[in-house]
Amino acid sequence: MTSTNPRIEALGAVAADWREPDHPPREEAVSETLDAPNRWTEEALDYALNRWMQRLTPEALSEWLGDAAADPAGMVGVWHGASEPLSGLRAAVAVWASGHAYLGHVPDASPALLPAFAEALCERHDDISAEFVADPDVLLQQAGGLIAQPARDAATAVRERCEAHGLSGTRCLLQSPQLAIAVLDGHESDDARGGIAEDILLYEGGGHRRLALLWSPTDLSPDAYLESMARFRGVFPAHEDTPGALQMQKAFLEAQDEPHAFADGLEFLVSRGAPDIPGPDGHIRWSEYDDLGTVGAWIETHSDALYAVVAREPLHDQLPASWPLRSPGDLHFPPLNDASGTALAKFVESLAVA
């Protein structure tokens, strides 16, 4: 199917080029990203790029954003987060497809991927523009609307800065990182356990949607899940800084005499205990439940920060429909038109008619 929006066609064409690992602009951007201050590996970067670029087809973009080619309606700023290498990609794509002028600020952790993709897109289509600024205050001063991915503890400060620059709530969309949990029942297949390992470990315990808490039936052995994490690490080795980051957590658990397990090289660390959310360092919490009411009570308390409940697909029918259920292995690569993507598309559309 051919889109009637030439900007969407251009986005699909550039994404197709970027699906090739040896595409020169992609190779150069990946190399620069690996030299930046982050804990992402080449394997994780290549995998993330492949998964996202496969999503950006003209058909999928048209289904998400609609196919009407809107007239340019002003400058929209995107303050990209640092939680993962392509944080804010969906926001940038929505702006480019809409016809708005795009003004971006990328973090030191990922300085190259989005600018390189934007450059290729501008070369592909004259009606698409992209500019990047180093100072977020310049972004706030020049943008008529803003999309930002601040850390949760920085969201209030970012909102106040938006308001100080005249960007009210209707012209400022904040999308903070969210948490995810997994609900296990002991009947997960090898593929499901592998998907959960990916959701946990791909970004070294980080990511815009972070899985760090596994709910398990009481007395379920974690051995099979630990084996899946070890197999994942065989394909996606840990970043060289990960063992050092986990060493302090391991020492604390030992001092507190809390049950825990870890890989020989400390590429991951799992502890068993109360459902506390570990920091974004690769430490995973394993908490037990006697009945799902315990999990439900936790979800109700943390609903404002919760993005997804990861569970094997056959288990979905046994869990409350009100839970934000997701299948293992897709946590970091959500559908373009999930709840966050739909809110994003509506926000960009509202700026065109304001």
Image (cartoon, helix red, strand yellow):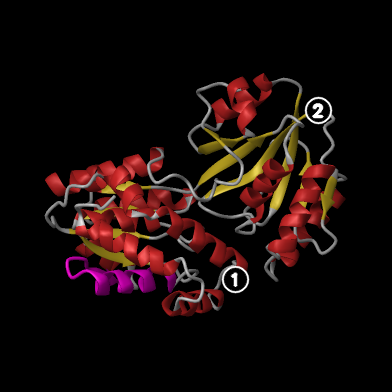
Residue 71, relative to residue 139: is it above or below? Answer: above
Image coords of residue 37 (percent x, y): 55, 73
- Residue underneath mark 1: 42
Image coords of residue 101 (percent x, y): 20, 62
Residue 204, relative to residue 115: is it above or below? Answer: above
Disc 2 residue type (three-letter): Thr
| Residue appearing at x 59%, y 71% in the figure | 42
Disc 1 residue type (three-letter): Glu
| Residue appearing at x 81%, y 43% in the figure | 224
First-in-chain label (1 vs 2): 1
Write down the quadrant of residue 127 in the picture. Answer: bottom left
Element assignment for label 2: loop
Write down the quadrant of residue 79 in the picture. Answer: bottom left
Write down the quadrant of residue 184 in the picture. Answer: top right
Residue 189 placement, left or right of 320: right
The region drawn magenta spans: 112-133
- Residue underneath mark 2: 218
Residue nearest the viewer, comparing 37 with 125: 125
Does the magenta portion include 114? Answer: yes
